[in-house]
Amino acid sequence: MDITLITEGTYPHNMGGVSVWCDQLLREMSEHTFELLSISATGTENSTWELPSNVARVGTIPLWGPTSRRRAGPELRKRFAPVLELFLSSLAIDNHGRGFAHSLRQLTEFARAGELGAALSSKDAVELLVGMSPACNERADGEGVRQLSVGDAVEVLVQLEHFLRPLASPPPRTELCHTTANGLGTLPALSAKWELGTPFLMTEHGVYLRERYLSYLPGTLSQAARTMVLRFFKLLVETAYENADIVAPVCRYNRLWEMANGTSPEKIRPVHNGIYLNSFPAAVTDPAVPTLVFVGRIDPLKDIETLLRAFAEVRLKVPECRLRIFGPTPEGGEDYYKKCRELATELGLDDGSATFEGPIRPTVKAYHAGHVLVLTSISEGLPYVVLEAMASGRPIVATDVGGVAEGVGSAGLLTPPRDPSAFAAACARLLTDEKLRKSLARKARDRAVQLFSAERCFALYRGLYDELGPRQGEVISLPEEQEVFRLRSSVPVREGGTEQVLAEEPEVLA
Amino acid sequence: MSTAAGVVPATALSEMAPVSPEVPPSLAAFTGEVPPLLLKVVTAAVDPLEIAASLETCGLSNAVVKDRFGHQDVFGLAQELYGSARFRGAPAKDPGTKRPGGIADLGRGVVFATPTLMFAGGAIALRSWLSWWTVPLALICGWAFGQFVSYSGFSRQASGEGSGATVVWALLVALVSCTCLGLAGDVIMGGRYSGALFAAAACAFMTAAAELVVHSEERLIGVMLVPGAIGSLIFITHEPFRMPTIVAVALAGISVGGTVVAALRRLPRRWWRLPVVKRADLPTALRYFAHGVCCGLFVALFMVLEPAKVRPDSWPAAAAYPMILSLGVMEWQLRSLRAGARAVLLGSYTVSDFAVAARRKLARAALCYLVALVVLTSVVQALAYARGVAVPVPLLLAGICLAIAFFLALVVSSFGRVELVLLGWTAGLAAFGTWALLTKVVHTGWVFPSTNTAFCIAALISAVILALSARRTVVNPFCHA
């Protein structure tokens, strides 16, 4: 089968969990031919991955490349006005997104003709947006947000012009579109679905909409501009969920967000990430000194500060304990790294007890170098480090965020995020209670083997491809192990939805 | 929850709640600590999902929400908070930049003016040991490569990319082309071989300085220029030091070498692996290159047209000094205009209101610059007169027109409309070229204006076209985005 794999900001230009997953998928699905469509920042990024031979073509859609210098003439402005009006009115608060999908289709025609950039960058567009902004900025309780100024309108239109650039690319002419996330990457898939009837499979690692909310925190734009940009993303995400044939989140946690945005529960098929178990053999010996290991980027989302504070408390109970932090500092994250180093010094951890050791290859060495893997993230999907550490026979102490609980199961201890004391208590307990640690380590290895092998993950994807492929075969039923976690949601579940009781609840420390 | 950096203790929250009605009761019921960010999100949220997105990152995961608040998940709590919180929109963050315009910008202008002092020394040298084409060659090549480097650098910065190898390749090409053209000039038009060396050095300086400007290192350029400025002053005045020419040249060489080293210091060991220029940027980068050629050509014409008619002991190109000395004012007014127009943009609610206010800002900035230019022209002419030098009036007017054209070109190019700048320069140069063709080659027998008058008219044509372009550009709200 010919499949278009659509990525945004990840494979093949960047490293990270999603890129690892993409590479695994392409290599495992060697019976299929892939076209890779990458939505990138500027289009000048180099490929950081060696592409497998079943990738027939690579296309790039740069979002932030140079803006077209074309100007909108009177004829274009006249043609564009009703389309823009429909598009903007669909963003109005009380309109519930009516007309959004239809206006996207109409915008596609302008984009393909190379006219969308010019049309969105016209004074007419600014005037129309300023005029319509009150309808898009009213809160339900009647308290209005300040109207868009000319500057705000320009900011919104400039951002929309960039976000809508994927519409200019022709619809992929393959038998299936597979996106690795919701969001802008779904625009080509939606085009293919609407124009050619191409089936559309969406994998969701992080929750795209949630990440957009966190990117546009109050203060990043004026309130009115922020409202409009976030409504655009919400409507786009909802449209994509509605049009996707199957939504395959990497964890059940994502499912809550998907249903909160209107996805039918029956089209949600969680498929956990998988790892190559051979690359992560179970550790046979333990380090001489009690050691906690962190593997990941030095990034605020990983909340290294809480980790350091917790470790300082652990040392009060286990004085000889060490904390080894493995992982790169991403570009732009140097200030955070410095802040963490300063905090370590302030906490008296600069005596060699807490060490920042940079990236390590292969990562299994890092897992074998400690007794326990620690993860203090404030936001996660289903992190690979947890699965890899479990396969390496290490118990986990982690924060209960995203899909971490699903990954860890009963093979570790979970604490609330940003709670150094609880986290320290869990670490100390595992370091001092050898029997418990050994027991959790065995469970971890067993759980990884049972649930998180790459073979298993991609067998499920193979089934999804078969289901959506030209043969239109019978609907696959996912193995029961995929449904082991309780759905903790206030979002109403359709009748017949899959709610099952968690087989093994992770231990959550209050 | 324990204390963490940037977290408000619960006691502080409870104290705040009675006097801040926008804090919802649900938040006030927190038993731990509430991050200030969460309060901000709750009161400014565009919908309940935005609050839900922030809850977990602030430590309130589904499990915590269930245990402490009895809601089934973050969505339930988010809905309650959204419904009970009093809305308070958050304004866009102040980027924290000081409002431009002032002493600092005047200082930047001095930095930009200093190398021109070295060119003044070069202009004197024209009469003694440099050929007439040397300074024009250096100006044209240096300005062009400098524009190319600065555009590529700013473009990379804007797209958040790391360093590129533009400056290295631009330096190499500039040095090779300047040296070859210099040597060809020596052979064809006559001269001493020092001309090629001078042109290559000056061109290298301008190219390297452009890279430093991209990184906002004008101060470093200023430091690097100190030896060259001293050498140039010595060379220009010759008194009271009577320092040998070779020392002045060595001092200028230190400036050039230092600037090149400073510009290259950021490059990694394997710099040749870095991109030179993005393919998508190439057309615009070439337009900036052409803009640099035009700038260099105009100034070169200004410097070499009339020196023979000025007394040998006078200042060559004295009419150019007001323009050079007003570079600081030019920079100051440009930044004030941009900041003012941006403020107007954010405060206008119709495009026509914005256009009227933006035009006023442009007119004010141009007028301020013109007044400063006229004052400086008067001062320079008074000093020149005191030394017995009479600069022809058409040349003075040409200087004013050209300076205004440069200011307007700076305004228009700063808004990214370099094609309009090119139009302005091309029209002026074409007018002057036509005049030269008709008088020097065709000999029609008509009565033509003098060289100075023709140059003045050419500069005026450029200035008028650039003024119209600036007026058109400044009212386009997208140019301020």
Image (cartoon, coloured by chain):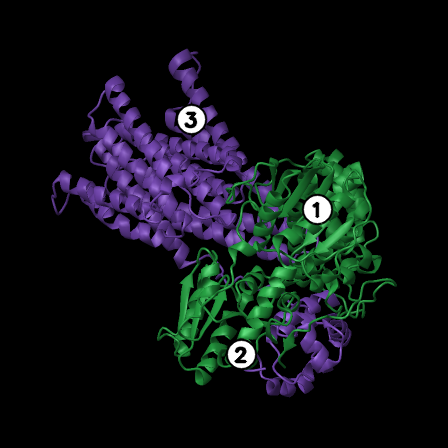
Horizontally, residue A337 falls left or right of residue A501, namely left
Which amino acid type corresponds to the residue marked 3 in the rendered image? Ala
Q: Distance between the residues labelled 2 and 3?
A: 96 Å
In the depicted structure, whether residue A380 falls above or below residue B365: below
Report the residue at 33% width, 34% height from top: B172
Palette colour of chain A: green
* 2 vs 3, front mark: 2
Location of mark 2 (residue) = A435
Q: Where is residue B470 in the image (x, y as percent from the top left)?
A: 55, 41
Chain letter of the residue beneath label 3 in the structure image: B
Q: Mark 1 points at which residue?
A: A462
Indicate left or right for A380 with B373 as reference.
right
Identify which residue, B422 or A207, lies in the foreground: A207
Tell me which label, 2 or 1, sits earlier in the chain.
2
Q: Is residue B464 visible?
A: no
Residue type pointed to by label 2: Lys
Which residue position holds label 3? B454
User: Label 1: how many residues lie within 10 Å, few (<14), some (14-19) or many (20+)?
Assistant: some
Percent coordinates x, y for residue B50 in the rendering:
70, 66
**Chain depicted in purple:** B
**B260 sits to left or right of A121:** left
SS of the residue under disc 2: helix
Residue A309 spot, x, y in % from top left: 48, 77
Q: Distance between the residues labelled 2 and 1?
A: 40 Å
The chain holding disc 1 is A
The residue shown at (39%, 57%) is B104
User: Mark 1 is on which residue type?
Assistant: Arg
Q: Is mark 1 on a helix, strand or loop?
A: helix
Q: Disc 1 versus disc 3: distance between alpha carbons?
A: 78 Å
